[in-house]
Amino acid sequence: MNCSNPTCSLTQAISVIGGKWKPLIIYSLNRSSKRFGQLDATILGISRKVLTSQLNELLRDKLISREAFAETPPRVEYSLTSKGKELIPIFGSIAEWGTYLVEEYKDELVK
């Protein structure tokens, strides 16, 4: 498979879901909708600026949706779209593979 072409399906998929944070955001929204602060607290190590940027990219790519409630104080929740939910089994398989790697290389992993 030659994926140097920008129209390659693998290249396109990685450009949408790739990176350090997008898979974690998507997986965090698997069970329920979450507010910005909940995502910030759940995903350790992400800055608020990066979280905002990643959420905007996921919104643009229609993997998540944003619902603003007319309340005081304002409340906004993020949730997976049907397109985003399609990724959960894929990320589950990747997590299983990660578990295998941790077990296989546990003596070599940096603590």
Image (cartoon, rainbow, N blue to C red):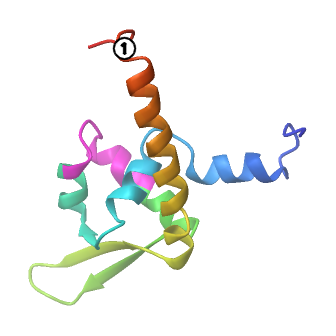
Left or right of 77, for residue 98:
right
The region drawn magenta spans: 42-54
Label 1, on which residue?
A: 109
Residue that sits furthest to the left in the current view? 72
Q: Is residue 22 magenta?
A: no
Where, by quadrant of the figure, is residue 69 drawn? bottom left
Residue closer to the observer: 69 or 27: 27
| Residue found 29% across the figure and 73% down from its top | 33
- Image quadrant in which the C terminus is located: top left
Left or right of 77, for residue 84:
right
| Residue 85 on image: x %, y % | 49, 70
| Residue found 43% across the figure and 17% down from its top | 105
Tag 1's secondary structure? Answer: loop
Residue closer to the observer: 42 or 69: 42
| Residue 32 on image: x %, y % | 28, 73
| Residue found 19% across the figure and 77% down from its top | 75
Left or right of 60, for residue 100:
left
Total residue callouts: 1
| Residue found 48% across the figure and 76% down from its top | 81
Q: Is residue 51 magenta?
A: yes
| Residue 106 on image: x %, y % | 36, 17
